[in-house]
Structures are given as C-alpha cells and as structure tokens.
Image (tube, grey):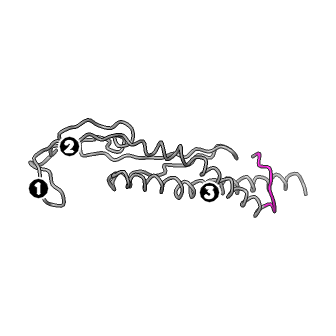
Amino acid sequence: MEVKDFRTRLQAVKIQFYQFQSHAINSLAKTLILETMHNRMRDFGYSDKIIQGTAIAGVDVISARRFRIFFHSEYFGYNGFDVALAREKNGTVDHIVKPAKKKALTSDGTWFSKGHEVSGIIPSHIIERTLDEIAEPFLDEYRRSERSWLEQNFGGTAIIAI
C-alpha cells in the first residue's frame, strides 16, 4: 500500500471515529443524563415548561479522549424572569404574583386571582447533582460502546491517538 493510500484510509477512519463519537455521546447523553434529569425534575414538581426547556444544546468532540456536553435549561415567565434558573440555582423569596396585562390571573380560561402571595422557590440543583452522579456511569457506558465500535471496525482493540 502506498503512503498516499494509507493517509487517505487513515483520514477516513478519523472521520468515521469522529462521527461515531458524536452519535454515541449524543445518544447516551439523551438516554442516561437527560432522561434522568427530566424524571428528577418531574419528581421535584417542576413544570412541564421547564422540563421541556431542558435539553442538550450540543456536543463538542475535542479529541479521541475529550469531549464536552452542553445543556440548556430555561423558561422565562411573562415578565422575563428565568423560572428554570431559579428552580435550579438561585431560588426565590416569598413574593406576590399579579397579572401582567389583565385585571386577574387566569388558567384555562378560568379567572381566579387579582394577585396573591406565593411561597419562594428552593433551589434544587437537580442538573448539577445529576451530572455529578451520572458522569462515571456515562463514561463507563461510552467506553463500552467505543470498545464495541473498535472491535467491529478493527477486529479488536486499537490504540486511538487521533
């Protein structure tokens, strides 16, 4: 095999491995991390709007052994207040909720309040704790899938120094 052919094949393998990494990391992040976060948020009483606003924002594959997963979680109230951030990190104090545009608050067409006091939100740190707890099981599962990919493509374990 000529050097040029070898380089071309090696480049193809690098691209295939990068594609595998991106797909595997995204897939595992959705099933292991994001689903766990969503379940914990439901258990803690988060609104569906906050849960739906929590997603994977992207995956950055840096090298064969390094990657980052970015998460996005936000839900803004009518006044621009980030409720998701308050639920996760900051919390709130007891406060009064008043209608922003109408004379009374409504839910599903039923008028129920011209304003009332609500209890503050205690920060839950669900996202942070979930990432801390699931990091090792996630990496273990990723390494298993990586070994499987290497065996399927090379017939055994290969050293990846791409």
Q: Amino acid at mark 2?
A: Val
Residue tagged 2:
118
Q: Amino acid at mark 3?
A: Ala
Q: Mark 2 against mark 1, which lies toward the viewer? A: 2
Seen in the image, is 153 located left or right of residue 125?
A: right
Image coords of residue 94 (percent x, y): 22, 37
The residue that appears at 85% across and 52% down in the rendered structure is: 4
Label 1 SS: strand
Residue tagged 3:
24
Query: Which residues are drawn in magenta?
Result: 154-161
Image coords of residue 162 (percent x, y): 75, 46
Residue 159 drawn in magenta = yes
The residue that appears at 70% across and 47% down in the rendered structure is: 64
Q: Residues within 10 Å of mark 2 (few under 14, many from 20)?
A: few
Image coords of residue 58 (percent x, y): 52, 49
Label 3 SS: helix
Seen in the image, is 145 located left or right of residue 79?
A: right
Residue tagged 1:
111
| Residues at marks 1 and 3 touching, judged by CB atoms closer than 8 Å | no
The residue that appears at 65% across and 56% down in the rendered structure is: 19
- Nearest the eye: 29 or 102: 29
Based on the displayed image, in which of its 4 quarters is residue 161 positioned? Answer: top right
Q: CA distance from mark 1 to mark 3?
A: 48 Å
Q: Give the mark nearer the N terminus: 2 vs 3.
A: 3
Q: CA distance from mark 2 to mark 1?
A: 17 Å
Label 2 SS: strand
Q: Give the mark nearer the N terminus: 1 vs 3.
A: 3
